[in-house]
Amino acid sequence: MRNNWTKQEIAEIYHQPLMELMYQAATIHREHQHTGEVQVCTLLSVKTGGCPEDCAYCPQAARYQTGVKAHKLMDKTEVLQKAEEAKNNGSTRFCMGAAWREVRNNKDFDKVLDMVKGVNQMGLEVCCTMGMLTEEQAQKLKEAGLHAYNHNLDTSEEYYEEIITTRNFDDRLQTIGNVRKAGISVCSGGIIGLGESHDERIGMLYTLATLPEHPESVPVNALVAVEGTPLEHMNRVAVWDMVRMIATARILMPKTMIRLSAGRLDMPMSEQALCFMAGANSIFAGDKLLTTPNPSFTDDMEMFEILGLQPRKAFKETSAHVHVN
Ligand code: SAM
Ligand code: DTB
Ligand code: SF4
């Protein structure tokens, strides 16, 4: 495991002829992962909309007219019911999202801690994505049984200001550090199709692959262009771009779960198959992501059947704890 990659090295990997890149990624995938095994995660938006941030891609930012209605934090019983459904459908990870800039120490946080306890007790890997966290808050989530925390870089350091102005790239790294210190598994990736260049995509991979420890999971999202957001007219990401990104991530971070995340609804099975071939080994299942649609469980199970993929068991060793001297 290496975390001293240079941008030059990453660029050389990334810009290889696509077939060569895929072959290398698939080879590394076979050496470090159980091929044919795909982690199935379910998302639930427990606190939707009304977010004060200005992330240009996001339908939940209060300042854009996207038709997403703001809701208060859901009740625990309802959340546990959704978790049960997800478990019955074969998901092993349940990720609760909140449209917050940061977690605050209030009654809502106490409610979240309670939800985390409940979901953990059901034997699911529980994950949250709720914005910035302090070290103490991360510790409390850990004590409640949180398995993973998702906090994406979203884009590269160089392109960050074009996409988000209400926080900066270092804020993201700070929270990722707090999650790591609390002993929670780190999930961090980004989105492509925001108008970034190849160099900027390489820049984002560079930051992820040179963290002191690689994230245990890296979601690669294709922008879901939502009407009303500043990025509503962006073109759909080409499958070749997804493949290039996933394959490079797989080569740089061999033990990490690479998640083929948002954007699958627009990808035919043949395109998704290329992504699995290139080293993706995790998906979000269930007919909704946070606020936008996603393929149904039945469609995904049919895809697994056709491609010969197996859902991965919960709490399997990820062993991405790379200790660096
Ligand atoms: N508010 C918290 C935050 O931003 O970290 C957590 C929720 S936020 C919706 C979680 C992630 O969803 C973002 O970091 C972003 O990568 C992804 N996301 C949001 N809108 C998206 C879109 N339209 N297309 C693809 N990914 C999106
Ligand atoms: C991630 O990287 N992608 C997920 C999850 N982590 C939280 C979210 C995708 C959101 C897509 C837009 C929506 O449904 O609101
Ligand atoms: Fe808020 Fe997160 Fe959406 Fe940004 S991505 S607007 S922080 S919910």
Image: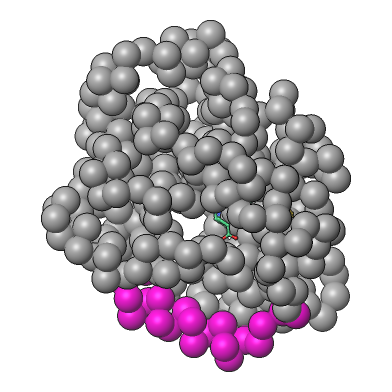
- Is the N terminus in the top left, top right, bottom left or bottom right quadrant? top left
Looking at the image, residue 137 lies above or below residue 212: below
Name the residue at 81% across, 53% down.
Answer: 53
To which quarter of the image does residue 131 belong? bottom right
The coloring applied to the image is: one colour
Tell me if I can see residue 325 in this picture.
no
| Horizontal relation, residue 203 to residue 247: left or right | right
Name the residue at 40% across, 51% down.
Answer: 266
How far across and how far down the image is residue 280, in percent?
A: 35, 42
| Horizontal relation, residue 213 to residue 134: left or right | left
| Horizontal relation, residue 66 to residue 83: left or right | right
Seen from the viewer's position, the closer of residues 120 and 128 is 128
Seen from the viewer's position, the closer of residues 304 and 40 is 304
- Is the C terminus in the top left, top right, bottom left or bottom right quadrant? top right
How far across and how far down the image is residue 300, in percent?
A: 28, 62
Name the residue at 76% across, 53% down.
Answer: 132
Looking at the image, residue 88 lies above or below residue 124: below
Looking at the image, residue 2 lies above or below residue 280: above
What range is drawn magenta here? 72-92
